[in-house]
């Protein structure tokens, strides 16, 4: 008898199941609008030109050592990544109260941040501290924080299906009612899956309540640069919160904006109150990393670090990112125009009002099923589509 | 505008400093682990003779982590290959890598592979493999959705192992006797006794090869241990941290895993390809799960995928791609294999030289175990005071438990290291 004979089958991960079904579909005009990976006009993954260039430089560089990286990761990578999120002239960086942990993609950054908060935030032992994720949110958020040990994961109002936009009053209400010291996971830009971000004024309102009620800010930043085409613009919310004096975490992913999906490049940026707190925080994060993956992989971090730390390469990268972002914006325009030209029932302004890789079409589950089964166009059951094919 | 905001922010922060302490005010500074302390002491030591023998990487004769020119060639070729598409992302990593890694441990003709009751998963290095295995056990061992242990680790094992099981939610970590300081070998009687008295269904972590002390179990030992474990229903979690470096061949180093599998045992096995491929930074790890029945494979696979998604989503492909490329091509494999034999042989050569030097110096103690063992790790038998003497007076750094990495000894430092060991073992204890 196997010791695993009681193990129940886990439900498949929806987005990967969708892709698996898509692959098995033999229809010649099939389209996959499910998984969030950028595709060119020829439906191919795009290796950024700057990445190709930097990979060659790295392979030719015989001076690079091949040892394990330090536990917290490649130092040049960590500082450059935090700078990208917080801005070159960030006062927090100048005050030496910003640190970072190189992680396995955005997922890894969220996991390390979550594990740390569960142990060392607001006293110790936060298994009962509520952690709020948006309704809806990236489906993996729940799993990551549950496995990190949080027992009380709650939704906060976000998407208003009726007005096809942000339910700001519901959101603010949830912030007011949340127990003090609750943790809130905020999408820095290009909300996944709705593509709907708060305006600057709405962010200010959110920040005001969070400060007053001592709620902790955990930013998930997977699309910096990808949303508007501008790194600074997409980081506005993060930088605003930092300027308002918040202690906060930012889980950064370079999978999308560097096209490095398979190298697992992420960074957990920590903005602390002062250097003394930062030192203690990083020491505990080091312990957590040591028992998770010991130290992070080097390849992806070297690519990103070399690019971010060299002015010419950095400029070239920003250009590549803008190319991707522009194409997404173009696709949105074209999609909306076509739908309107066809006289499709409903209004379609939200396609161009929303931002980033995804759009909430507003299709209901039956309509989604029709799209997949009759038309071989694959999208998520929630009506989420990827805007770039 | 910018400076006004900056000064306003400055004013805000000042008042907050007075009224609101950090939410992290209760965060303790973590005590640094032994390895880190040791490394720090070495780095800040400015004696020119200093030698660091406490690292994990295999070092070449020049004292550098070894990367064969052949692997460098493969890396360059892969990086310029335009036809290589992005592999479809999978939580389990590269399929070809998993296939080869599983075969390397179990052998091509393994009944478990043929009967489709094996799960092979690419992980983020060796630690990632142990962590994932621990998470799997914690969630699903014996239908117990919160298994806390007990988990048995050998004495003198890697000090981070306990932390990994605890972090996965299995706090009940215990020790079984392993290293016999007197006999400089495995304390088999003690080991068997401890396993005999362990609660049924305990998890037992065993080194398949390259135990940190260098003392590995013989085939006879394995026969006794496996029988006992089956009788007491103890679960084996086997470790292969430096696969290939003991006997120069992956399959040979993995013999204990094949043996247990052939007896019909269910087991987990964590291995790392970092050392035998010189891919330290790439973190190429592998977790093998051998099940008793193929009927549970899908369920276990689906739950493992869930666990991976919440840890790192997918492992990085770079290193796994190199390993898969080499292992699946007979010509490449042959060339790579030469390099691995060379590494294993060099370890043996260094051991012989160490033993000979110590004998010539008349160093107290018996040093036969140096050449009876294989692989890069070895326990010198130095006690805590002697280890401290070695680092403080002689600037030679070994692990606090007296273990060291023989590959870090080379023709430049051999004389100095052996003289230092000799002095430490003959000296009066430091007051």
Image (cartoon, rainbow, N blue to C red):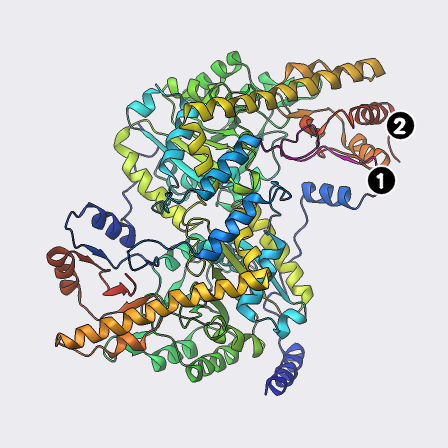
What is the secondary structure assignment of the residue under circle 2?
Answer: loop
Dot 2 crowding, Cα within 10 Å, few <14, some 14–19, many 20+: few
Task: Note whether residue A310 is visible.
Answer: yes
Q: From the viewer's perspective, is A277 left or right of B429?
A: left
Chain label for disc 1: B
Name the residue at 38% across, 43% down: B84
Residue B424 included in the magenta stretch of the image: no
Question: Which residue is outermost to the left?
Answer: A374
Q: Main secondary structure of the magenta part?
A: loop
Residue B62 included in the magenta stretch of the image: yes
Task: Note whether residue A135 is visible.
Answer: no
Both labels 2 and 1 in a single chain: yes
Q: Position of residue B62 (x, y in %)?
A: 71, 31
Q: How far apart, in angstroms, are the residues tagged by discs 2 and 1?
A: 22 Å
Q: Position of residue A254 (x, y in %)?
A: 47, 58
Between B350 and B402, the residue placed more toward the observer is B350
Name the residue at 78% across, 24% down: B414
**Which residues make up the magenta segment?**
B46-68
Q: Position of residue B324 (x, y in %)?
A: 42, 33
Name the residue at 54% across, 19% down: B192
Between A85 and B333, the residue placed more toward the observer is B333
Reading the image, the residue beneath label 2 is B428
The N terminus of chain A lies in which quarter of the figure?
A: top left
Residue A374 against residue B272 in the figure, above or below: below
Chain label for disc 2: B
Name the residue at 62% across, 86% down: B8
What is the secondary structure assignment of the residue under circle 1?
Answer: loop
Which quadrant of the view contains residue A343? bottom left
Looking at the rendered image, the disc whose residue lies closer to the viewer, 2 or 1, is 1
Residue A388 against residue B415 in the figure, above or below: below
The C terminus of chain A lies in which quarter of the figure?
A: bottom left
Reading the image, the residue beneath label 1 is B47
């Amino acid at each position: 008898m196997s010791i695993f004979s009681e193990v129940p089958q886990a439900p498949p991960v929806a987005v990967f199941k969708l892709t698996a079904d898509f692959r098995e579909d033999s229809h010649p005009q099939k389209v996959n609008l499910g998984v969030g990976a950028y595709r060119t006009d020829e439906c191919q993954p795009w290796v950024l030109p700057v990445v190709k260039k930097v990979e060659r430089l790295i392979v030719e560089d015989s001076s690079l050592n091949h040892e394990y990286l330090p536990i917290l990761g490649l130092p040049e990578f960590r500082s450059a990544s935090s700078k990208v999120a917080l801005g070159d002239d960030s006062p927090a960086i100048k005050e030496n109260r910003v640190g970072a942990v190189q992680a396995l993609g955005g997922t890894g950054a969220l996991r390390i941040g979550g594990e740390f908060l569960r142990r060392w935030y607001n006293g110790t032992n936060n298994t009962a501290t509520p952690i709020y994720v948006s309704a809806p949110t990236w489906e993996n958020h729940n799993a990551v924080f549950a496995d990190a040990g949080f027992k009380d994961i709650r939704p906060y109002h976000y998407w208003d299906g009726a007005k096809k936009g942000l339910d700001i009053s519901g959101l603010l209400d949830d912030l007011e009612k949340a127990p003090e010291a609750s943790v809130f996971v905020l999408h820095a830009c290009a909300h996944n899956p709705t593509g709907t971000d708060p305006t600057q004024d709405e962010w200010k309102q959110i920040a005001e309540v969070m400060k007053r009620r001592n709620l902790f800010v955990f930013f998930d930043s997977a699309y910096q640069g990808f949303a508007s085409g501008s790194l600074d613009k997409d980081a506005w919310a993060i930088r605003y919160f930092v300027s308002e004096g918040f202690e906060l975490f930012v889980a950064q992913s370079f999978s999308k904006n560097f096209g490095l999906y398979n190298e697992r490049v992420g960074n957990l940026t920590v903005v602390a109150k002062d250097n003394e707190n930062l030192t203690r925080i990083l020491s505990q994060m080091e312990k957590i990393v040591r028992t998770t993956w010991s130290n992070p992989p080097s390849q992806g971090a070297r690519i990103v670090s070399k690019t971010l730390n060299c002015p010419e390469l950095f400029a070239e990268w920003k250009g590549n990112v803008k190319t991707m972002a522009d194409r997404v914006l173009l696709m949105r325009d074209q999609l909306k125009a076509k739908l309107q030209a066809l006289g499709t029932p409903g209004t379609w302004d939200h396609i161009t009002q929303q931002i980033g890789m995804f759009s909430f079409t507003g299709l209901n589950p039956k309509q989604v099923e029709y799209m997949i089964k009759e038309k071989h166009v694959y999208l998520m059951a929630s009506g989420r589509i990827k805007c770039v094919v | 505008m910018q400076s006004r905001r900056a000064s306003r922010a400055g004013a805000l922060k000042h008042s907050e400093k007075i009224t609101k302490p950090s939410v992290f005010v209760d965060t303790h500074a973590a005590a640094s682990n032994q390895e880190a302390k040791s490394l720090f002491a070495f780095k800040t030591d400015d004696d020119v003779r200093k030698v660091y023998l406490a690292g994990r990487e295999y070092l070449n004769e020049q004292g550098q982590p070894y990367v064969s020119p052949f692997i460098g060639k493969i890396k360059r070729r892969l990086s310029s290959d335009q036809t290589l598409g992005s592999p479809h992302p999978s939580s389990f990593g590269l399929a070809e890598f998993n296939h080869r890694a599983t075969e390397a441990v179990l052998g091509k003709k393994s009944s478990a592979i043929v009967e489709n009751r094996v799960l092979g998963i690419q992980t983020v290095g060796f630690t990632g493999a142990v962590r994932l295995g621990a998470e799997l056990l914690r969630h699903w061992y014996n239908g117990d959705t919160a298994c806390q242990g007990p988990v048995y680790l050998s004495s003198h094992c890697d000090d981070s192992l306990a932390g990994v099981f605890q972090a996965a939610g299995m706090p009940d970590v215990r020790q079984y006797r392993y290293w016999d300081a007197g006999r400089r070998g495995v304390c088999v009687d003690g080991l068997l006794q401890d396993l005999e008295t362990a609660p049924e269904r305990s998890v037992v972590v065993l080194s398949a090869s390259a135990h940190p002390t260098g003392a590995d179990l013989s085939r006879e030992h394995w026969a006794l241990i496996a029988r006992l474990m089956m009788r007491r229903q103890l679960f084996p979690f086997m470790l292969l941290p430096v696969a290939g470096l003991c006997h120069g061949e992956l399959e040979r180093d993995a013999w204990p895993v094949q043996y247990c599998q052939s007896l019909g045992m269910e087991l987990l096995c964590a291995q790392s390809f970092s050392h035998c491929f010189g891919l330290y930074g790439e973190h190429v790890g592998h977790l093998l799960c051998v099940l008793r029945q193929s009927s549970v494979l899908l369920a276990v696979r689906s739950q493992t995928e869930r666990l991976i998604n919440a840890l790192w989503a997918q492992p990085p492909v770079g290193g796994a791609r190199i390993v898969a490329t080499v292992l699946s091509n007979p010509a490449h494999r042959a060339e790579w294999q030469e390099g691995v034999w060379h590494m294993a042989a060099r370890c043996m050569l260094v051991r012989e030289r160490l033993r000979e030097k110590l004998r010539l110096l008349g160093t107290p103690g018996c040093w036969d175990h140096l050449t009876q063992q294989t692989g890069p790790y070895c326990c010198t038998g130095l006690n805590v005071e002697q280890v401290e003497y070695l680092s403080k007076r002689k600037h030679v750094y070994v692990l606090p438990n007296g273990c060291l990495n023989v590959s870090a000894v080379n023709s430049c430092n051999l004389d100095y290291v052996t003289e230092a060991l000799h002095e430490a073992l003959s000296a009066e204890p430091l007051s």
